Image: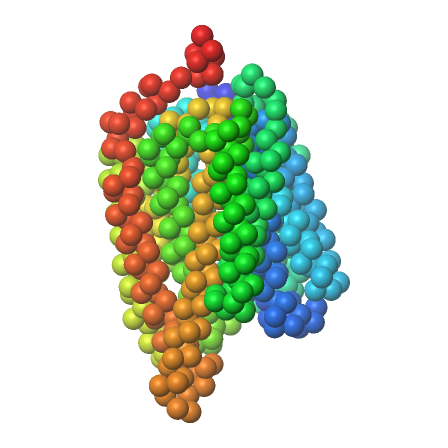
Amino acid sequence: MPSETRDRRWIALAVLVAAQFMVVLDVAIVNVALPSIQTDLHFSEQSLQWVITAYAIMFGGFLLLGGRMADLLGRRRLFIAGVALFTLSSLLAGFAWSSGSLITFRATQGLGGALLAPAALSILTTTFAEGRERNVALGVWGAVSGSGAAAGVLLGGFLTSSLDWSWIFFINVPVGIALVAVSPLLLRESRAELGHRTFDFAGAFTVTSGLMLLVYAMTRATEIGWGTAETIGLLAGAVALILSFVAIELRSKAPLLPMRIFRLRSLAGANVTSFLVGTALFSQFFLGTLYMQQVLHYSALKTGVAYLPLTLTIIALAGIAQALVTRVGVRRVLPVGLALAAGSLVLLAQLPADGHYFWDVFPAFVISAIGLAFTFIPLTIAALMGVQESDAGVASGLLNTTQQIGGAIGLAAASTIATTFTGHYVTDHPGASPLSGPALTYGFQITFYVLAGVAALAAVLAAVMIEPKAAEADVVELELTPAQEAA
């Protein structure tokens, strides 16, 4: 391959990574601005969470559909459409004039993210051949995914403190415009080489509505309780829709999610692990932010700066992580990363009500960063290992979906556990306020222990379910292309 073509591929990677960073950043950047948004747009306490939830429902619900649409309609085409929708929604969100308008624009932002994220990862997969080069590219991708949330807290705190909350949305606009402008020049168009262009509408409807209902049910449960008739009904409806989707896919001649991809043991293991990673680790940033702001009384900017060592450590270790995976395989690296992540959560569970950043928070953040670097990068590599080019989009959408749904369930469960045990503390200590540092810290401590258990379970399953390096290589060699299958 000519050096000019190789160089262009790495420039194309920069475009894809910039788009992924924008999406991951936007999940976290809003959190520190919520108090300012509530004041300016007159949100009630009950409706404020929809600034986060509207994005999460659309993003998590449409990822799988977005991945398959990329395969069928063209990956570059869907990437550009997703970036354009995300950028326009960001602009409108910055100009939001009411609580309802902001929630609407956040929902369309989530839809844009659901279109561009799997398209971007599938373009990466089809641009770089499996092996060292793809691992290097995925190392960069994983570093962005792992550090984006922490960077979002930092950038959100800076923009909210120095400018205005609107700028957490406006900052996406010039980036998005630039990406739309250069993508036709730098990205190669590709689509699945299939003998049909039939679209699985029944599968698309059931999985999208099922996942959206599941995220909504989890969020709603934190408000009204898990044992209420409404929560049980919503969860039952979500499960029924998802089971219907599986039944449809098993019979469909042109499935949205071809069940044959689960024969790839590493892909199946990576997605189970990805779900648990989302459950355990996404909540870490949420609870850590609450601890620093509500217990240590940090400002939005100071909270963001506190995450800087975590972000820089992940970026610094990205190259080492992908090199280790290339040398020794995913199964030897991923469980170690998850074990370190579990250890950092155990350290966070020791946080005192009168904690000090450098003695209490900083060590846990550094260990967490090491764990995340050795988790997100091998996890992404494993989830795409042995996947045919025709399934690149749906495999990318599946990985994003399992992480996001795991994250939604984790946040809902973490909020419930923390609130419950804070209430227990108040009950056992008459006169204590539920907003006092000791009461809040107790709830956080118990929740961090639970999350550490989930991360430890993920480490065990990764070690058991993901193929050793030699077996992974065999899967790749034996995988037939559609043309070979036809022959």
Q: Please, which residue is most extreme toward the bottom here?
A: 431
Q: Residue at x 50, y 49 (%)?
A: 239
Please identify the quarter of the rendering in which residue 143 is found. top left
Q: Position of residue 307 (x, y in %)?
A: 43, 61
Q: Measuring from the top left, give residue 296's x and y in whole percent.
A: 43, 76
**Figure colour scheme:** rainbow
Q: How many numbered discs?
A: 0
Q: Position of residue 424 (x, y in %)?
A: 38, 80
Name the one closer to the observer, 255 or 454: 255
- Residue 396 appears at what percent x and percent y? 48, 36
Outermost residue toward the top?
487
Quadrant of res 198: top right
332 displayed left or right of 239: left
Query: Which of 325 and 75 lies nearest the eye of the viewer?
Result: 75
Q: Is residue 414 above or below residue 320?
A: below
The quarter of the image holding the C terminus is top left
Q: Nearer the viewer, residue 351 or 425?
A: 425
Tell me the quarter of the image containing the N terminus.
top left
Quadrant assignment, res 422: bottom left
Q: Residue at (37%, 44%) from the top-left corner?
A: 272
Q: Is residue 381 visible?
A: no
Q: Name the residue at 33% across, 19% down.
A: 477
Identify whether 141 is placed above or below 337.
Answer: above
| Residue 339 in view (yes/no) | yes
